Amino acid sequence: MRLPFKFKQLNMSLFVFNLLLAIWMAGFANFRFYQKVAEYSAFHGFYQFLFLCVTFLILTGLYLFILQIISWRRTAKIVAVFLIILTASSSYFVNQLGIDITKEQIQNVMQTDIHEVQDLISVPLFIHFVEFLFIPLILLMCIQIQPKHVLKTIYQKIMVCFITLFITGLGLFSFYGQYAPIFREHREMKGQISPLNIIANGSSYFKKQFKQGNPPLVAYGTDAKFVGQGQPPKIVVLVVGETGRAQSFSLNGYQRPTNPQLSQIDLVNFTAASSCGTQTAVSLPCMFSGMPRKEYDEGLASHREGLLDIAKRAGYEVTWIDNNSGCKGACDRIQHVIIPKDQPQYKQWCDGDGECYDEVLLQSLQNYLKGLDIKSLKANQLIVLHQVGSHGPAYYKRYPKAFETFTPTCATNSIQKCTREQLINTYDNTIVYTDYIVSSVVKQLQALPVASSMMYLSDHGESTGENGMYLHGAPYIIAPKEQTHIPMMLWFSEQWPNKKQYSACLKAKAHDAVSQDYLFPTVLNLLDVKTQVADPNLDLLHRCEGS
C-alpha cells in the first residue's frame, strides 16, 4: 500500500503490529460492552476499575491470539483492513444505537433494501467512520512491517500464543466468580463485542444458508377446503403494520390521542398481543407459517407453504400490496403481488428516491376494488397490505406534514442525538398516520355492499431510547416490551355473518393474552377455510362460536 504523497513511515515488527491492532479492537470500539460489564459486576470504585482492566486484557489477549495465528507479514495489512471495517461497522450500531449484533440482525442486513440503508446514513455515522475507519486506515498505510526470518517468526508466534493464553486464563480464573453469572444471565453481551459479534454471527448465518441450499417446496394444509358454499363472496383485508408498538396506541391506554380515527370505529382491539420476533425477517414469515413462536423453524418456513398458499388452494383470490421491503417469502407463490411504488400512477405519494407514504396502499386498494366489479363479485378475496408504517430511524419520513400532530420533531435519522421529547413526538406522529391508514381501509370496506372484515397487527414493536436502546431486533429472550408488545385489532362489516355475536364475544376477551400465533387459524376461519393444520385453540373466532 503506497500513498501518492509521503507520510513518515512507522517501522515495526509483526508482533507489535498485531498487538496494536488487538488493543485497538478491544478498546473504545467496545465502550458499551465495558459499560454493561461494570453495571452487572458486584464491584465498585477501585475494584470495578481493576475488573474492567482485566476484562480489557482478556479481550486483547483473545484478539492477539487469533491474530498470531491468521496474520502474517504479507497478509497482515489485508487482515487489518478487513477487521477495521468490521469493527467500525458493528461498533456504531452497538455503541450509538444500543443494538446487539446477532444472527437475526445479520439476516436483517442481508434482506434490507436500498431505502432502509439510506435511512441509516447520518452525521453521527460519518463522524464514527472518520474516527474508527478512515483514521485507522490512514495510519495503517503509514506502517511498514519489518521482515523477519520465517523460523524466528514462527517461534515468536508460538511463544506469544502460550503467554497470551496464560495471561487470559489467569484473568478469567481470578474473576471467574464474576464472569460466570454475568455471561450466563446476560448472553446477549456476546453481541456487543466488536468485531467478534459480526464475525461469529455472520459466519453462523452464512453457514446456515449454505447448508439450507435450495430444498424442495413442502406442501402444507393440503386438506384445506372452503366451507362457505352458498354464501355471497366476501372480502378480507389483512393490514400488516411495521414497527408499531402497542404502548403508543391510545386504544391501549396511551395518554396521547394517537388514534383519533380508530377510536370512532366499532372494532375489537386486543390490548395484550405479542409478536413472534423483534424484526420483520422473523415475524413476517413466522406469522404466515402456521408455526407458533416457540416452535418456529425458520429453515422449514422458508420452503413450506403457508397461510396465503392455503387460501389460494381453497379458491380465494389472494393479493399482496407492498409498500415495504418485500414479504420475506410469505407471498413468493402468490401471482397477484402489487408494488405500487414502481407504478407511475402512484408517484404522487412517493419522493424522488422511491420511498412512499402508506397512502399509496389506500390508493392501490381503492383501484383494485374498483376493478373487481363488486356488485357481481364472483370470487372471495384476501388482500394483504404491507405498510412501511413506523420504520426507523427516519421516522420523520413516514408521514406527510399534515400529520405532524406533535411537535417539536426529530427531523433526522440521527435519532440518538434528538431530545427524548422530539423523538417521541416524531414516533407518535407515525402512529397517528397509521391510525389514518387503517381507519381509511375500514371506511373503504364499509362503502362496499358485500361482507368484509379487516385485521390489523404490527410485525414487531420499537425501542425509542428506553434503557439506551433504539430501533428493534433485540434477542427475544431479553427484548424489552416495547419491541414485543404489538397493536392488534379486528373489524367486521355490518353484512358479516354473526357480526354482533363475534364482536360482543371478542370484546369480552379483548384483554386476554394473544399473539401473532393466532393470525394463521383466525384468518383461515374468517375465510371459511377448514384444515387440520389450523389449531382451534389459537383461533380467536373459534372461542366465540356457539357462544
Image (tube, helix red, strand yellow):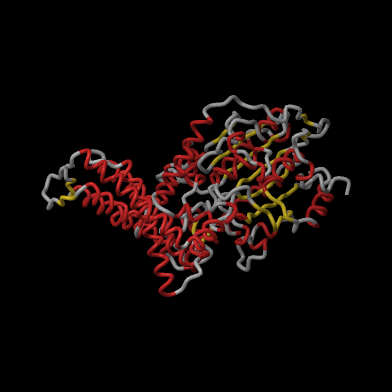
Q: Quadrant of the N terminus?
A: top left
Residue 12 shows in the view: yes
Residue shown at the point (16%, 52%) measured from the top left: 10
Q: Which residue lies most toward the top here?
A: 216
Which sits in the foreground, 379 or 195?
195
Residue 301 vertical position relative to residue 105 in the rendered view, above or below:
above
Would you say 472 lies left or right of 305 here?
A: left
Q: Quadrant of residue 59?
A: bottom left
Total count of labels = 0
Q: Which residue lies most toward the right here?
A: 546
Which sits in the foreground, 310 or 213?
213
Q: Give the percent coordinates (x, y) of residue 414.
A: 40, 59
Residue 17 vertical position relative to residue 173 in the rendered view, above or below:
above
Residue 424 shows in the view: no
Q: Give the percent coordinates (x, y) of residue 121.
A: 37, 52
Q: Which residue lies most toward the bottom here?
A: 45
Q: Give the percent coordinates (x, y) of residue 218.
A: 64, 27
Residue shown at the point (79%, 42%) measured from the top left: 536
Would you say 333 lies left or right of 207 here?
A: right
Residue shown at the point (55%, 35%) measured from the top left: 338
Would you say 506 lies left or right of 369 here?
A: right
Residue shown at the point (51%, 69%) measured from the top left: 42
Q: Give the percent coordinates (x, y) of residue 488.
A: 67, 52
Which sits in the foreground, 83 or 44?
44
